[in-house]
Image (spheres, rainbow, N blue to C red):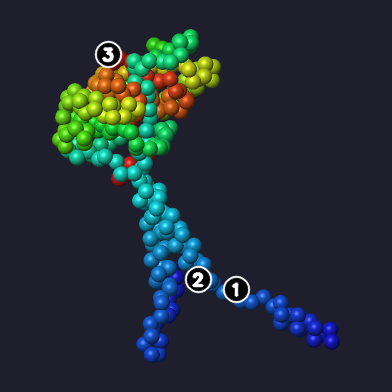
Amino acid sequence: MAKRLQRASETVFAPEDPEFQIAPMVDVLLVILLFFVSITSAETIKARPQSLRVLELPVAKDSKKKETSAGEVVINAGWEDGSGMLEVAEVSTSKFADPDRMRQFLRDAVKADPSLRALIRADRKVEYGFINQIMLVCTQEGISNITFAVVDKERQG
Amino acid sequence: MAGGGGGGGEEGDYGFQIAPMVDIMFVLILFFMTAAMMKVSENELGIKAAGTPTASQEAQPAEIQLRIDADGTVSFNDRVIGSPIDDSLAALRSRLKEAIDLFGEKQPVVIIPQSTVKHERVIEVLNACAAANVKNLTFGGGS
């Protein structure tokens, strides 16, 4: 009797062959894939310079992540042949060297939004004298909140 | 990677091939993981431009002047604190941190770069200020 009971319990509780479940694995893989696709493509589309060469932004590891692009004017500043070049998409589609050319645009923009801020996307080679001129124009037109675009790490390749 | 299997049945009924799909998914995941790791994101460092009127008239601690020479040398109230090859500016960070711990966020810091200083160097100093949690930050006139 005892032997028969033992055999029966072995039959009932015998460990089954663990089968490799492919369906949950595919589910998990799909979720991981979706995650990586979303974080890779969620990069904000910036106002890239049209006529300036690609800007090499300076690196700042302690910079803050940008919260919003609302209420800001983007000023691209490059350095070509020893002098500063500017481009503000709303002002002109071509580059220009004189920061005074964006004065009227900034004045109108500040009128429309008094809390406007300026985002200066300057190449790392631009001299401070030129940046200073840009900041001066911004301040004179009523923009006191100025931010500089930086990258969190050196671009590879 | 994933093993083969499947194939057509005896009546030519081809079933859904899960193994190649898993292979492709692995490759896609690898691709996007690598792309995510190499992604450089654009951040920002902010200042309040000089000349902005302040609301309070309370006495403020004496301002800290950070001068940047044309060669990249950084001075803290006229005492050299960072050589041109010092990218991390660790000494500057700790001095600023001490000042902020002592006087709080009211402590004014003025960056005074020479006009020929490269933007990259100015950003390194701004970054040191951000690391030390300097809030009352502005630029002085370039010389």
The residue tagged 1 is A18
Label 3 near label 2: C-beta < 8 Å?
A: no
Q: CA distance from mark 1 to mark 2?
A: 12 Å
The residue tagged 2 is A22
The quarter of the picture where the N terminus of chain B appears is bottom left
Q: Are marks 1 and 2 on the same chain?
A: yes
Q: Amino acid at mark 2?
A: Ile
Q: Quadrant of residue A89?
A: top left
Give the SS element for disc 3: loop
Instruction: Please indicate whether residue A16 sits to the left or right of residue B140 in the image.
Output: right
Extreme-bottom residue of the structure: B11
Which chain's residue wears label 2? A
Q: Amino acid at mark 3?
A: Ser
Instruction: Please indicate whether residue A73 sits to the left or right of residue A1 in the image.
Output: left
Q: Residue B59: horizontal and vertical position, in percent? A: 48, 9
Can you see residue A53? no
Which chain's residue wears label 3? B
Give me the residue at 40% from left, 69% from top. Answer: B21
The residue tagged 3 is B143
Badge 2 local density, few (<14 within 10 Å), some, or many (20+)? few
Q: Residue A97: horizontal and vertical position, in percent? A: 16, 27
Instruction: Please indicate whether residue A53 sits to the left or right of residue B28 in the image.
Output: left
Q: Quadrant of residue A154?
A: top left
Give the SS element for disc 1: loop
Give me the residue at 24% from left, 27% from top. Answer: A108
